[in-house]
Image (cartoon, rainbow, N blue to C red):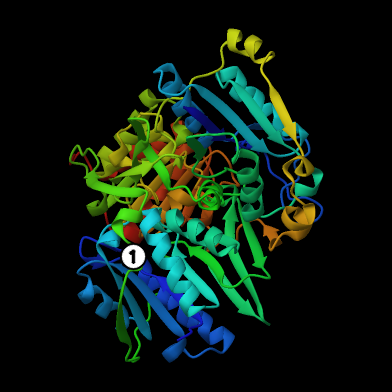
Amino acid sequence: MACRIMILAEHEDGAVKEISFELLGLAHRLAGQAGWKADTDIKALLLGQGADELAKTLVERGAAEVIYAEGAAVAHYTGDGYRRVVEAVIREESPELVLIGHTPNGWDVAPLVAAGLDVPLATGCSNIRLEGGKARFVRKAFNGKFVHEVEIERASPLMATVDKGVADPVSTHIKGTVRKIDAPVAEGGLRARFVEIKKGVSGGVDLTQAQIIVAGGRGVGAPEKLDVIRELAQALGGQVGASRAVTDAGWLPHEHQIGSSGVTVHPKLYLAAGISGAIQHVAGMKGSGYIVAFNKDADAPIFGVADVGVVGDLFEYLPALTRAVKEAKGGRL
Amino acid sequence: MKSLVLVKHVPDSNSPFRINGSANWIDDANLSFVLNDYDRYALEELLALKDAGKVSEVVALTVGPAAATSALRTCLATGADRAIHVKDEALAGCDPLSLAKVIKTAIQNEGFSLVLAGLQADDDNHTQVGALVARLLDWPCATATLRLSLQGDDTVRVERELENNRLQVVDLKLPAVVTVQTGINTPRYASLKGIMAAKKKEIRTVALGDLGLDAGTVGGSAARMKTVRFAPPPKGKGAEMLEGSPDEVAKELLKRIRERTGVI
């Protein structure tokens, strides 16, 4: 029961995560490039317990077959539990390409599986191309300052983790099937034990619902200087966001952090000040409607995703914009 | 309990980067190098465990060229007890899996109970070497941790950072590998006393032959993942750049924000 492409699905709170559908969409595109048959060659692997309904949703989104590995040992994610099952299923199915999300659980399990199978792993891919019998993986280096393209040879399967939001899900007419198997792993044999999921401390800030966000980065320089961000946010009636550098340094609580490891936001207006635009940050804000970036470095990657950019001192440009906004609102603040 | 931190010597991220003549990486001439930021947090986590009497020894290991010794010196000056430098010209260009095989071989007989590493390196961003080493050793692993505590002498409890401000609490049986997210602690800086003391600490240099490894298997020439293109990112849709005095720019921005978003 071999297949060409296998994707590893992820789920949380009783729902399949969007990255899983994106991976299926990418798999369809790649099957087209390689001349493989999307209606038989693409499979999804789902692990869990009591997740039969989730398996069905993957069938509707482009998987010819969903292998649903069920067991108490994989009721919750652990690297040790997941990698044993994923490795065993890959050995059984011998896919040519394995796609995993570049997510906290994806980057946790993918290297464990790759090392177990003795194959290289291309991480954080924004694109993959299958051309002339070769596989090229497009990833980033230096936190997004460079595109790093790699080829993998003498390895089967080819393995990659793929960034969120780089592929579109597909809607297909494929009538896939679900095949349920017992997860080939016993709880007693694991050396990792799931304890609980904790929600981070929240001060009531919910950036995911914000229409306007003004975000500050390392370039702001010091915690007391964040007022320049707060004042513009207040004038605009928006929320204050931050890059990881700012929350790591303790200038703002973690809940303000936007990016792959923080929150993903979709405001109508996003202003980034003193944020270079590392991949981790861009992953969380590129879905914004209109992006304005201020940075002293004209080569900052943030200008690659912004609609409009200003190179200069944010302590001059932001207060000027704050004044202009207040004036435009005509004292209606 | 013996502990190890895996570290890397990387170009300072504020450096002006240029692409090298072979167009397969940056040109590292005239760049200043630093200890990888994530690794500073990993080191601090072990030094704090040592201060608390829970870890007896903190060892730092790197694989890299001669200049990478400076990353190890930083670790020693900050408080690590000794260091191991795997250095071999044949390793230039090796892929992460080969690198992990080298590290595994270098540490497998050292008796470490806890191995920490940064979540990723600021240069190649591979985000995999720590976990690869764990699997090669057949040890459990957890990545991107924001809290770590030893539970007795056989378990480490970690809190892994997930998406949307969530943490996963997981217990790993020792020995284990844990990779560390920035922000887990506040890394200390080397003191003058530390810098002086570091001069007397051991940095053991090891070549592939000393590990019984063959360049034809793990060296750069044997890499199965190879760089085929290295370039600046595409400008994407490309931002429209505004120039002028702050007031002029503010006026133009306001106009565009009104037209494009309707939020004002």
Q: Is residue B101 above or below residue B159?
A: below
Q: Quick one: B249 or A278, which is closer to the camera?
A: A278
Is residue B175 found left or right of A75 in the rendered image?
Answer: right
- Can residue A220 be seen here? The reply is yes
Q: How many numbered discs?
A: 1
Q: Is residue B133 above or below residue A149?
A: above
Is residue B88 found left or right of B226 in the rendered image?
Answer: right
What residue appears at the point 74 percent right and 46 percent down from the top-left corner? B212
Chain ID of residue with mark 1: A
At label 1, counting other C-alpha atoms closer than 10 Å, the crowd grade (few under 14, some 14-19, many 20 or more) is many
Dividing the picture into quadrants, the one containing residue B77 is top right
Please state which amino acid type lies under the numbered disc 1.
Answer: Glu
Percent coordinates x, y for residue B133 in the rendering: 55, 48
Element under disc 1: loop
- Can residue B241 be seen here? The reply is no
Give the farthest residue toward the top. B193
What residue appears at the point 38 percent right and 42 percent down from the top-left corner? B173
Specify the quadrant that holds the N terminus of chain A.
bottom left
Q: Quick one: A240 or A31, which is closer to the camera?
A: A31
Specify the quadrant that holds the C terminus of chain A.
top left
Q: Is residue A44 above or below residue B19?
A: below
Percent coordinates x, y for residue B209 in the rendering: 79, 43
Percent coordinates x, y for residue B241 in the rendering: 53, 52
Q: Which residue is mark 1?
A: A10
Percent coordinates x, y for residue A162 in the rendering: 48, 64
Q: Is residue A160 above or below residue A310?
A: below
Is residue B225 found left or right of A202 in the rendered image?
Answer: right
Q: Quick one: B116 or A312, which is closer to the camera?
A: B116
Q: Quick one: B135 or B193, which is closer to the camera?
A: B135
